[in-house]
Amino acid sequence: MNTPAPANLKQLAALLRDGEGPTLEFKRSTGELKEGMLTLCAFLNGSGGIVLFGVRPDGQPEGQQVSDQTLRDIAQALDRFEPPVNLLVERLSVDKGREILILRVEGISDSIPFTFDGRPYERVGSTTRKMSQKTYEKLLLERGHAKRRWENLPAEGLALKDLDRKEILRTRELAIQQNRISPATSRDIGEILDRLGLRRNGVLTQAAQVLYGKQFISNYPQCLLKMGRFRGTEITGPIVDNRQERMNAFAMVREGMAFLERTMPLGARFPEGKIFREDRFPVPLGALREILLNAVMHRDYSHYGGHVAIVVFDDKIEIQSYGRLPFGVTVEQLSRPHRSELRNPFIAEAFHRTGAVEV
């Protein structure tokens, strides 16, 4: 949530004009403390928000008497959140010893979902309601994913000899060129992997295998790139080119771009005043590269039947990867500014170090 807590009466008036909504709730006094805490819980599980005690439902600020007992009651109520919540209770004087109490929380935390008195809540418009069990369980899984992701689990049986040394050293060289790793970084591939967070306490992670592995068929069949070129506009059309290869993530991007350049239908034009034609791809290579990078970096690698696919038709190009959108992000939001959430931070960070992307 980007809305700051009001620091003076002028800012308070501007905030109250908006009325209650997805990130703002009015309570007449701490006589409604429990209800206010339920709404704070909902804000914590969403985009954050502010609860104002001492404001009538119509937005009229009247304040309330605030005693030491009032503050103790709030502190005790905050103890009933799980996971624990730490927030500062702000006070704003309005008239004759009466104050507005301001409780503001941020949303989108690794600790989501939060509960109050053992129950989770969510905000829908200007209403606070109990969260469904299905949504709560999904958020719990995502919380576990944040700390125990597929990419940072140990890669059983993986040793340095099983990784592509040249690819690791290429990452080092590119990272140095981009000023994203120190030129003094050792050429020892184990130490490089340590710097990238891909080896923990001497144990290689599954992200190391995805990024630099050489063998995939037995334990990592999902490291698969499917490439197809079809004549016409449907996948049922004649097959011009069809390949499937298992490879590491860096090789996947290189191979995928080479396939696109080789199989995309070319357009051509003759610039005015020149005798030679200019061939043009139907889609800028830079845009395709960014799409392919996202497909490789942000896919769900935990699904062993997953893959990345590139399909070229006469009239369109499709790039596919396996995985769902992060919780709270919809397809509609993707066409406008929205929060960015990395499914595989270590994999994305390795690409970032090479200058391939800005994370």
Image (cartoon, rainbow, N blue to C red):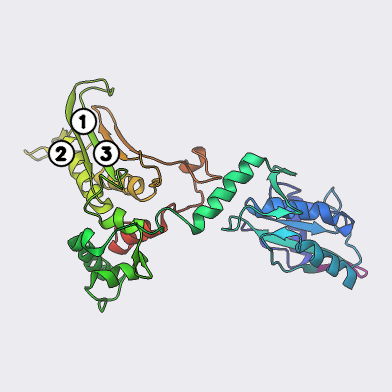
- Element type where label 3 sits in the image: loop
* Residue closest to the eye, 123 or 277: 123
* Residue closest to the eye, 156 or 340: 156
> Residue 229 got which mark?
1
Measure the C-alpha gap from mark 3 to mark 2: 13 Å
First to last magenta residue range: 92-98
* Residue 272 visible to the viewer: no
Left or right relative to 16: residue 241: left
Q: Earlier in the sequence, mark 3 or mark 2?
A: 2
Name the residue located 73 percent from the left edge and 68 percent from the top edge: 7
Few, some or many residues within 10 Å of mark 1 (<14, 14–19, 20+): many
Name the residue located 71 percent from the left edge and 47 percent from the top edge: 121
Q: Earlier in the sequence, mark 1 or mark 2?
A: 1
Left or right relative to 337: residue 312: left
> Residue 99 got which mark?
none
Task: Residue 301 in the image: state x and y as whole percent.
Answer: 38, 47
Left or right relative to 63: residue 211: left
Which of the two marks, 1 or 2, is nearer to us in this view? 1
Few, some or many residues within 10 Å of mark 2 (<14, 14–19, 20+): few
Q: Earlier in the sequence, mark 3 or mark 1?
A: 1
Residue type, label 2: Arg
Which residue matches tag 2? 262
Which residue matches tag 3? 283
- Proximity of marks 3 and 2: CB atoms separated by less than 8 Å: no
